[in-house]
Image: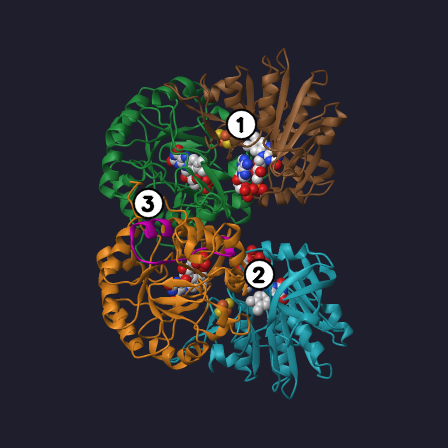
Chain colours: A green, B orange, C brown, D cyan
Amino acid sequence: MIRDVDLTAHIGRIVLQNPVLAASGTFGFGPEYRAHVDMRRLGGIAVKGVAVDSWSGNPPPRVWETPSGLLNSIGLQNPGVRAFIRDDLPFLRELGTVLVVNVIGHTVDEYRRVSECLARESGIAALEVNISCPNIKEGGMQFGHDPDRAFEVVRAVVETAGRPVWVKLSPNTDRVLEVGQAAQSAGAAALTAINTLLGMAIDLDRRRPALGGGSGGLSGPAIRPVGVRVVYEVSRRIPLPVVGMGGIETARDALEYFMAGASAVMVGTATFGRPDAMTRVIDDLPEILRQYGFGSVAEAVGAAHPPAKGEADEH
Amino acid sequence: MIRDVDLTAHIGRIVLQNPVLAASGTFGFGPEYRAHVDMRRLGGIAVKGVAVDSWSGNPPPRVWETPSGLLNSIGLQNPGVRAFIRDDLPFLRELGTVLVVNVIGHTVDEYRRVSECLARESGIAALEVNISCPNIKEGGMQFGHDPDRAFEVVRAVVETAGRPVWVKLSPNTDRVLEVGQAAQSAGAAALTAINTLLGMAIDLDRRRPALGGGSGGLSGPAIRPVGVRVVYEVSRRIPLPVVGMGGIETARDALEYFMAGASAVMVGTATFGRPDAMTRVIDDLPEILRQYGFGSVAEAVGAAHPPAKGEADEH
Amino acid sequence: MRLTIVERRVPASDHVELLLDASGLGRRPEPGQFLHVATGGTLRRPLSFSRVDDGRVGILFRVVGAGTAWLAGRAVGEDLDVMGPLGRGFPPPPPGPLALVGGGVGIPPLFFYAQCWPDASLAVLLGARDREALVMVDDFGARGLHPALCTDDGSFGRRGRVTDLLATWLSAHPHGSVMACGPAPMLHEVARLTTDAHCPAWLGFEQRMGCGVGACLACVVPGAPGAGRTWYRVCTDGPVFAREMLYGEAPP
Amino acid sequence: MRLTIVERRVPASDHVELLLDASGLGRRPEPGQFLHVATGGTLRRPLSFSRVDDGRVGILFRVVGAGTAWLAGRAVGEDLDVMGPLGRGFPPPPPGPLALVGGGVGIPPLFFYAQCWPDASLAVLLGARDREALVMVDDFGARGLHPALCTDDGSFGRRGRVTDLLATWLSAHPHGSVMACGPAPMLHEVARLTTDAHCPAWLGFEQRMGCGVGACLACVVPGAPGAGRTWYRVCTDGPVFAREMLYGEAPP
Ligand SMILES: Cc1cc2nc3c(=O)[nH]c(=O)nc-3n(C[C@H](O)[C@H](O)[C@H](O)COP(=O)(O)OP(=O)(O)OC[C@H]3O[C@@H](n4cnc5c(N)ncnc54)[C@H](O)[C@@H]3O)c2cc1C
Ligand SMILES: Cc1cc2nc3c(=O)[nH]c(=O)nc-3n(C[C@H](O)[C@H](O)[C@H](O)COP(=O)(O)OP(=O)(O)OC[C@H]3O[C@@H](n4cnc5c(N)ncnc54)[C@H](O)[C@@H]3O)c2cc1C
Ligand SMILES: Cc1cc2nc3c(=O)[nH]c(=O)nc-3n(C[C@H](O)[C@H](O)[C@H](O)COP(=O)(O)O)c2cc1C
Ligand SMILES: Cc1cc2nc3c(=O)[nH]c(=O)nc-3n(C[C@H](O)[C@H](O)[C@H](O)COP(=O)(O)O)c2cc1C
Ligand code: FES
Ligand code: FES
């Protein structure tokens, strides 16, 4: 392993020991992967979406494998913010890793109340406002497709959070830049991208949509080109740090996101196949960075952008 | 092979001997695959997008492989409608297969003029209005993301075409239903879906976007869940036949699209890997249909829809 | 964790049993627990332990799709990438008569159960759709047990459902208990019959999984109806559930 | 079309040559033509013919990514799914002296050329980045040819570029012609040198391909600058182009 490559990542004022975080919804509320992953080695953990009250989620089946991908329709099952604070936060706080809490709601007010409840708690580095979940009928993605509503939600969370607010973007819209700009105007400290693509599979035997929830969210390597495209566009046009994700399995994939403009990355679906996916990315990054001529993660960020970064030379 | 399964497909008044067409842009202007595919066996052929004047397309590299997918940035290189009529149409007419001409333009007027030029020609079953190509800066996708502009373009083509007009939908928007409805109001006879997903890959060695055109369109099995979702939604809500595509490689994949609501399918990227992909789908369909309890393609269309088709029971 | 394949058997067409060197396995598995096996796709595949012998553990599966087909193509000497043992297995035999009720690929964990409790006197009731799918009958024989058998098509044993055998057994053993594993409709019927007969039952469920460790909330089954209704995760709360957890006190 | 692998050679580290039973091949390939080979991914991989011997055809490749790695793992007796011969190859030797100029994996089609024209007297100039990448030198020897060699790192032959060898050769052979194959920068330099020397040249290009048959317009290279500028498809208009098609009459 190469030691003199600097893996530190900066998301605004938050400093990560390395740029690899667990993606929300794929790493539970903390302790589940304890026996399988050395959690202290991670750059950070984004826990599953937390609402003001408990949500029961969608009927099973909730996952379905597709070519190089995964459809899920969990439906944001969660125990509610109070249960989260009581049952899960103490363990997570103990860990000492950078903790990001993913926030969900049906209404602006519900987002605000989650944020208020968490404001009193220590040990949380940032909130990640999920306005991009395709698996619930109200709330979620509708905010992520409408810049005005995105502004409202993000503003409500920023006003109450007392800590940096990250906003998670949906790739299922042609207005991703407008939504990202709205998030910035509302005070977001960073953008995270991408959430899953809206997809569906049919169960041929049962002659109906395979997932209990009908359609679901597509993740995994299949969507990596979409994630890289969104990160590239957003990071060029909006002066906020971007945390990239979508289909990252290897250090090479992570480097693709850094070059596209991500300051850090999250790994989701890959963890299901290989619980050590994140620690392998971390282990392999120094060598890969070196191989492509970078002395640090920071140097690689945006390396694929055209020379005059931020200039509107493509339109 | 099972013989007593009816493969006939109906797209409005157009009758196809079987429901498998070559997807636009992947089968050239006709003769290229002649030595490799028995073209008379196909349900039909959609030729590459044709503009009023020749377009030069994007700089290479124009393709890049991704997990279970393909990024392309051809940029709609084409010789213009007059050259098409002169050089390619005679061969295609000879073939006797159902011919669909994909129409592109930068402006409403350009679309109209292609349609006018083709109106005088025999041997064309339908026009497919491409308002969903992610690979050109103006025209193309911008029409496919805006219901009002989609209406204008489709209306202009319908007024001049003198034959059925199909409209090809973009999956890169949250307004696919509105755009489809606009196409219907403007007189479209069918919808085709989906065009490619907007994506990007980075060439790590060169530290820049891999494709000469920067971003590109993602196709192949990776996007099948997105295609199935769009076809399911559109066919349930809009009373027009839908031609489904995106990632179809096998008869099973085609059946997934039929059950989701497609009346026929197109095969694109799979042909690159296996020139016999389409004829294999055609050969295998009778057995697959039979295996899942269908006596014809028509019976399978929409089989995965909830019982009361068209009812708004999901919202 | 990587375990080496030391033996490969084909107990019936479309069925393969792989025996793995268990020395890499941290804990001795309990019957009903499973291995989460990487098979080349995005997700792992959950497979129950079928036996433990001489430092080897078995998995016995039916080839139904890409993952099991890949696995069926593995040869002795190759390694498998596995996680496990995962989940909660069947409890020790309660006092009184005990029936093992298995359907199709639900049979392997029950054979492992019989193997773990060599002194327990057990009734074994097995069903499957056809003769080929009725696996491990000889293994039960070698353990000194004589399963009652049935197939949907009558090609082996009685024609009918394994729950018909169970109904007969329950009427003869009013104080019996049941350990069952098989497809969901079979388990529902086992729940109904054992509730009616006031006999305790433990049920081994299948559900499509993501993580296998409780993190993704994919593999849920609904808990007993009522005010506190919740979802249970098959991977960590199960795969084996006491009947009451899922069905409460009323027959389903 | 499926062709069986009848021999597998490892001419250098990271390089593999597969010899395929050519009886399934419809036409005898010309040097410069290629096979489009399925290697497990979405797209096929274009690979030039390296030789034709005793009813066998060869492909010789460097392992650079997933497709060539897959191919390198094939064994004798397995079939490859191929399309071809595709594209337009090199023309017959024009009158006068002729040099073959090859760089790296551009060498194999030139050896095949030498093989096809056993009576032609040829100068062979080969370059590569290092000794390992300088393939088929012995094959040229067996054909009675003695290539001039160079490597970027000087590990074999002269240190330098193959175009340096060409410049020397051109000054000694003012009426010579050139057949060249290799990376694009090398071909640009060959175009420049041969234009300056007023010598005809044919150039074998690489480009990322989709269909391989001219249908998708992926594999383009720009035609000669000027009013009628167009794109040529490497798969069907090439891979071998007369220099003028791409560079016109002026040096690049
Ligand atoms: C706890 C548990 C124990 C199991 N034990 C056994 C066993 O001992 N022997 C055996 O033959 N089978 C067993 N199964 C079922 C086995 O997991 C599936 O048959 C297998 O995953 C199918 O994979 P595939 O790729 O071949 O099929 P595909 O249908 O192609 O798989 C697609 C996806 O669906 C999932 N899937 C498909 N069928 C099932 C199923 N019945 N249950 C859960 N997920 C499914 C797969 O894991 C995969 O993610 C068990 C399932 C569970 C949950
Ligand atoms: C006409 C022609 C003849 C060729 N002949 C030979 C030969 O004889 N020996 C040899 O070693 N190589 C040859 N090449 C290059 C060879 O095609 C690539 O090295 C190979 O496709 C790489 O595939 P991969 O999956 O290992 O690499 P990856 O980089 O993983 O491939 C990713 C994609 O890029 C394409 N690609 C990558 N490199 C090239 C390249 N240099 N040219 C074209 N496409 C590329 C691949 O086909 C694939 O679609 C030839 C290329 C062309 C166009
Ligand atoms: C099972 C599952 C559950 C998820 N739940 C959430 C969630 O609660 N909140 C959220 O913002 N994203 C959620 N996501 C999206 C991921 O965080 C991530 O954005 C997406 O999966 C793309 O990354 P990947 O390809 O690495 O998985 C979920 C994804 C999966 C697969
Ligand atoms: C190389 C390439 C070129 C394409 N050109 C066109 C085009 O000219 N017009 C069009 O409507 N769609 C075009 N498409 C989109 C396809 O017709 C199809 O919608 C898409 O590829 C999804 O299907 P597939 O996954 O089967 O390829 C092109 C796709 C590819 C891969
Ligand atoms: S499979 Fe992830 S919670 Fe059970
Ligand atoms: S590869 Fe399709 S045109 Fe050349």
Q: Tell me which corner region of the image, top left, top right, bottom left or bottom right, holds residue B119.
A: bottom left
Assign a secondary structure to mark 2: loop
| Disc 2 target residue | B1
Q: Residue at image x 72%, y 23%? A: C145
Mark 1 and mark 3 in contact? Answer it, CB < 8 Å.
no
Query: Residue A214 appears at what percent x and percent y?
Result: 39, 41
Q: Chain of mark 2?
A: B
Residue B22 in view: yes
Q: Is residue C12 left or right of residue B87?
A: right
What's the magenta region? B231-252
Residue highlighted by disc 3: B308
Q: Which residue is mark 1?
A: C187
Above or below: residue B177 compared with residue A84? below
Q: Residues within 10 Å of mark 2 (few under 14, many from 20)?
A: few
Does residue A88 lie above or below D13 as drawn? above
Q: Is residue A272 above or below residue B128?
A: above
